[in-house]
Structures are given as C-alpha cells and as structure tokens.
Image (tube, rainbow, N blue to C red):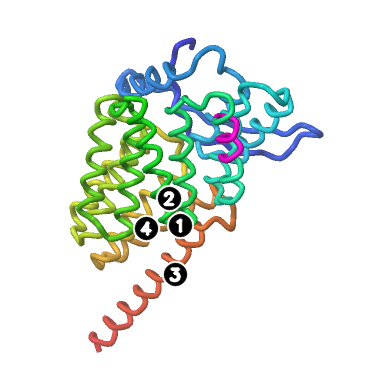
Amino acid sequence: MVGSIFRLESIRQDDPFGDMKIWTIRMRLCGDDENDLKKLYDHMKSKITRAEMNLMSLGLTMWKMGKFDLAEKYYRQFLTKLPSNDSSLSKLYQRFGLVANSKGEYDSSLEWYEKSLEIMMKTRPFDYVNIGNTHNNIGGVHRNKGDSLRALESYNRAVSLFKEANDENHPNMASFYGNIGGMYSAEKKYLEALDLYEKSLAIQKKHLPTDHPDLGLSYNNIGTVHDLLNDYDLALDYYDRSLKIRLKSLPSQHPDIATSYRNMGLAYEVKSELEQALTLMKKSKIIYEVALPVNHPYLLLIKNDIRRVEDKTKRVEAAERHLAR
C-alpha cells in the first residue's frame, strides 16, 4: 500500500478502553479513475519538508480536516517540547491563531497572531512574505469580529508588504485579493468584489491543481457575489462548482462542505424552492454539529435558517389547504 492514496471519510472518538482513548479513522482506497486526487496529493506533499514532519505538521493536517480540537491538542504537545527561544515558536503561534479563529475564539486568535508578529519583527523584520501573511490572518479575524475598518487595514498592509518584496505574483496574493474582495462585498461594492475574486481565482489556477480546496473557496466567493446581485441561478452554478471540489478534496465532515450546503440552501430559499432549501440546510446542520463547538456562530445561524424555512413551508402549506377548500 506504500504510495497509495486514500480518501479520508471520517474521524470519530469511540468509548475509552480503560485509560486508553480510542479514535476510529475511516479511509477509502482511491481507484485508478481518481488521478485528479493524485495531483492534489503531489501538490500538498511538495509543501511539506522532511523537517516539518512533526506534531506541528500533524496539527496543521487536523486543522485542514476541520478537527480543530485535535489540532490544538497536537500544537500544545509540541509547545511543551520547545525552549523559549526556539525559532519555531513564531510559526507555532500562527497555528494556534488559525485554530482559535476557526473555533470562533477571535480574541484568543488575535493574541496568538500578535505574539507571532512580535517575534518576527524582532528576529526577521525584512521577512515581508511571512509578516504579510500574518497581517492577512489578523485581517481575517477582525473581519469575523465585524470590524471591517481594521480588517481592511490589515489586508492592505499584507498586499503592501508583498509588493515591497517584489512578489506580486506570489500564490498568497490570491488570498489577499480574496479577502479584500470580501470586504468590498460587505460594503455592498459588489462589482469591485467580483473583480478581486476573479483576480484571486486567476492566480490560483496558475499555481494549484484543479481540485484544490482554495479553488473551492474562490468559486464559493464568486457565487456569493452573484447571489447578492440577485442572479441566483448563476450563484448556484458557482456554489455547485465549489461543493464538487470540496466533496473531492475535503473530509466528509469538514465545515466548508456545510457552508456550501448552507449557501445553496439560502439561494433556493430566495427562489421559493423551500423543500430543496430545507434539505440542503439540514445537511449543513449535521456537519456543523459534528465539526464545530456548540456555541459557534455558524451553528446558531443554520439552526435559525432551518426554523425560518420550516415556518415558511408551514405557511405555504396552510395557504394551499385554504385555497383547496
């Protein structure tokens, strides 16, 4: 089986056996007709050096799979092994920031990123790429907190640093453009947002395999703008492209898949196709309940969505019964 490619289906914690904690990991051997996943595997493998094969890289893998508590556990184990002046601390603090942001713990996330940034500014102040990435991540947290002004400041700072490094074609610029596009979308500047999302997608297509999760994010973002422009059929087309990539490249319980289902459900709701909307929203809720903490904002939103659509469905059914009399 060496060199074989498996698709991760699910991870669950089973009942303990004595003092042992038992995890069941379900994987499926990919067939010869799934060569697209080999391209994705080769791309991701090229990003990991032998020196990084440790608890920190394992934690990053768990984060990418949507297993945020497991990721944090491995990072904390790794932290206990590092001396206070270790060169890996800055990167490790970044990873803690990623996990906290994904869990909705935004203030904690900002603290981790600021600690990472403080180390970088002291030890390698001209490392514009990594400092720029950190500002981009900080912007993402401010955006999640609803602080659009600080978010945009951080995103623009990231772009400026990459330009200062003469690296405007760096793959990470796709993320920066995408994030700024998100800010324009929040400000209802939809055409400007669409332009930036398409710039982001163009960069990604140059650097990434066709089923990379980042492409799924870009298609989702473009779909969101078309949704806001009331072009629901085109929005659903982009949401569907995003979902297909995510179903191929992510574990079945990943929250990004739930987001795709929710977005599609919202579009069908506006189109008054309530049965389809409810089906998709319930799929989203099932995944969010597995992947996210019980008080996560996304889980609260999807529960409200389902209640709203169920209420609409009841009103429609009542009206139909009344007309049938």
Residue type at tag 2: Ala
Residue 172 higher or lower than 196, as above or below: above
Residue 45 located left or right of residue 291: left
SS class, disc 4: helix
Q: Position of residue 111 (x, y in %)?
A: 61, 44
Question: Is most of the magenta stretch helix, strand or loop?
Answer: helix
Name the residue beneath numbered marker 2.
151
Residue type at tag 4: Thr
Quadrant housing residue 189: bottom left
First in sequence: mark 1 vs mark 3: 1
The numbered mark at residue 279 is 4
Q: Residues within 10 Å of mark 4 (few under 14, many from 20)?
A: some
Residue drawn where x is 49% and y is 44% of the image: 138
Name the residue beneath numbered marker 1.
147
Residue type at tag 1: Asp
Quadrant housing residue 242: top left
Residues at circles 3 and 2 in contact by the CB criterion of under 8 Å = no
Residues at circles 1 and 4 in contact by the CB criterion of under 8 Å = no
Residues at circles 1 and 2 in contact by the CB criterion of under 8 Å = yes
Q: CA distance from mark 3 to mark 2?
A: 32 Å
The numbered mark at residue 307 is 3
First in sequence: mark 3 vs mark 2: 2
Q: Position of residue 233 (x, y in %)?
A: 19, 55
Q: Residues within 10 Å of mark 3 (few under 14, many from 20)?
A: few
> Residue 106 versus residue 315: which sits nearer the camera?
106
Residue drawn where x is 26% and y is 41% of the image: 241
State the extent of the magenta-drawn residues as a range. Answer: 113-120
Residue 314 higher or lower than 137, as above or below: below
Q: CA distance from mark 2 to mark 4?
A: 34 Å
